[in-house]
């Protein structure tokens, strides 16, 4: 037990986002905003994490189901002070340090939160607030000090000119003595510009009660960025991208242009891999070492081994790519593609639920869906597995060392035995045994002099 619990506020309407979606479900680098404070609280070792929800609370609960989180409801959004009070029941019996985070402040590092907690514990404070110094403090609450001592926090909307000039702002992040904060919350007033119960008023209440209030100022003010509108969402996304890309580069990954490389949080990339500009890598994706990912490639939820090359404009979704594969340009690997190694999937080739054993290749203009393919199979240009009969999907099985001539259609379900050869232009409807030649072309008809007897246009 760490005697540490976290409450994360996420009940607000998020009006300034102008969105149908709850604010904290908007994403940064592949994760909803709320996932960041939740993760930070867990990293800090909080025994309990309670999220206060209200506006679109069901959607938020749904998005975070299965994670070890308590939800408290704030049915009416009466302000941040009222929101914390709504978590009282969930924390009944808890004694110790209460970390309060806002669901819309995603960039705080756990190192900064550790410093905040350390100050609070060292000073035996009742309230310790995390602050930042901003050149343009905008709409953030201002930290009002008397000498070194923090006296009050005043919201921008309630501030006098002299207070507005203060550059030290409230990040909306605090550590409270849990007993103390829950004892003063019910007495807060809503006599202010917004008619809300402000959590920030707890500071003044502590000063009045003769309890210690401390502040801990962030080294990097960017961490304080709160997301209230889409301009701030884009700014935070860009800062997160810089962090992720910097870490990738420090881990040995080359980025030709970090400004235009979009990698989700949690993606793993091995050293000596190279990313071209305009690459997007999303979700739970792992890329090995010595890979080259060219411009305009998008990779989602996929596992890519070492020495893989993904050329320009290719899309890879929920696929597994073995070592040494060459993909694209302009290839589309859809869900359930599995390449075991040294495969080539060339331009304008689409694969779906297809497993190709080593060294099999489809270099051009081919569709391979619902297929099981052995080793060293060569797909000629324009091969199609006809997997769908309008009702059901059927499987094509192609064994090792099959050579498929160009412009072949496999009418599934169908099985081609090992080392067979399919003649170009064939429509294969029946199984083919091993070592056979199968072709279904109608014999060619050639009529001599046809063009002379049937001229396109009469000659004058
Ligand atoms: C708040 C602080 C401000 C600080 C800023 C930092 C107050 C009064 N002000 O202002 O000093 O500089 O954060 O980003 O606390 N929420 C609820 N229920 C409510 C109201 C809000 O759960 O009734 C949640 C929101 O969903 C949000 C968080 O509390 O996650 C902050 O609320 P918001 O309205 O964004 O406060 P700010 O105006 O940003
Ligand atoms: Ca806010």
Image (cartoon, helix red, strand yellow):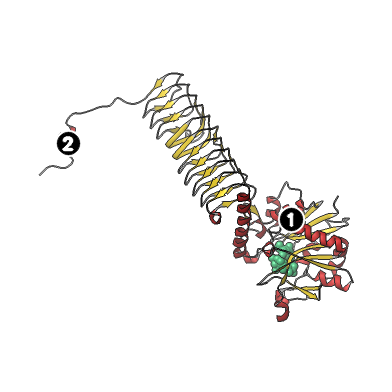
Residue 110 is marked as 1
Question: Which comes sooner in the sequence, label 1 or label 2?
Answer: 1
- Residue 338 lies, with reference to residue 98, above or below; the image says above
Spot occupied by residue 13 in the image (x, y as percentages of width and height)? 68, 64
Q: The residue tagged with tag 2: helix, strand or loop? A: loop
Q: Is residue 77 visible?
A: no
Left or right of 232 in this view: 131: right
The outermost residue toward the bottom is 161
Identify which residue is drawn at 86% across, 50% down: 1
Q: Is residue 378 visible?
A: yes
Spot occupied by residue 372 in the image (x, y as percentages of width and height)? 52, 29
* Ligand 2 picture quarter: bottom right
Question: Which of the 4 image quarters holds residue 285?
Answer: top right
Measure the C-alpha gap from mark 1 to mark 2.
82 Å
Question: Which of the 4 image quarters holds residue 364?
Answer: top left
Name the residue that disc number 2 marks: 454
């Amino acid at each position: 037990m760490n005697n540490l619990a976290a409450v994360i506020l996420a009940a607000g309407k998020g009006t300034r986002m102008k969105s149908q979606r709850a604010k904290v479900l908007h994403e940064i680098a592949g994760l909803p905003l709320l996932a960041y404070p939740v993760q930070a609280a867990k990293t800090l070792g909080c025994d309990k994490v309670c999220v206060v929800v209200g506006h679109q609370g069901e959607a938020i609960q749904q998005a975070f189901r299965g994670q070890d989180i308590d939800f408290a409801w704030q049915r009416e959004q009466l302000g941040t002070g009222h929101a914390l009070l709504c978590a009282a029941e969930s924390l009944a019996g808890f004694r110790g340090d209460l970390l309060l985070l806002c669901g819309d402040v995603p960039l705080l590092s756990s190192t900064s939160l550790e410093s905040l907690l350390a100050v609070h514990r060292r000073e035996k404070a009742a309230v310790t607030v995390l602050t930042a110094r901003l050149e343009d403090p905008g709409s953030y609450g201002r930290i009002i000090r008397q000498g070194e001592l923090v006296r009050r926090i005043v919201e921008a909307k309630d501030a006098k000119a002299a207070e507005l000039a203060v550059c030290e702002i409230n990040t909306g992040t605090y550590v409270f003595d849990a007993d103390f904060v829950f004892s003063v919350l019910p007495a807060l007033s809503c006599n202010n510009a917004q008619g809300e119960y402000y959590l920030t008023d707890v500071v003044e209440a502590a000063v009045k009660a003769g309890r210690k209030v401390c502040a801990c100022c962030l080294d990097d003010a960017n961490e304080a960025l709160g997301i209230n509108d889409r301009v701030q969402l884009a700014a935070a996304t860009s800062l997160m991208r810089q962090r992720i890309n910097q870490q990738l580069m420090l881990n040995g990954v080359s980025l030709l242009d970090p400004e235009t490389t979009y990698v989700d949080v949690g993606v793993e990339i091995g050293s000596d891999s190279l990313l071209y500009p305009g690459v997007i890598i999303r979700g739970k994706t792992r890329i090995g070492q010595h890979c080259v990912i060219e411009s305009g490639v998008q990779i989602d939820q996929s596992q890519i081994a070492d020495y893989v090359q993904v050329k320009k404009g290719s899309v890879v979704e929920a696929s597994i790519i073995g070592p040494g594969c060459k993909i694209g340009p302009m290839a589309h690997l859809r869900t359930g593609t599995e390449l075991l190694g040294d495969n080539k999937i060339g331009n304008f080739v689409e694969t779906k639920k297809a497993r190709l054993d080593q060294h099999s290749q489809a270099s051009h203009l081919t569709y391979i869906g619902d297929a099981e393919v052995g080793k060293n199979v060569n797909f000629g240009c324009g091969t199609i597995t006809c997997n769908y009969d309008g009702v059901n999907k059927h499987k094509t099985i192609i064994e090792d060392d099959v050579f498929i001539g160009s412009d072949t259609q496999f009418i599934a379900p169908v099985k081609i035995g090992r080392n067979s050869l399919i003649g170009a232009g064939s429509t294969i409807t029946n199984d083919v045994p091993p070592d056979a030649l199968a072709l279904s072309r109608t014999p060619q008809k050639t009529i001599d002099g046809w063009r002379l007897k049937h001229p396109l246009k009469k000659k004058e």
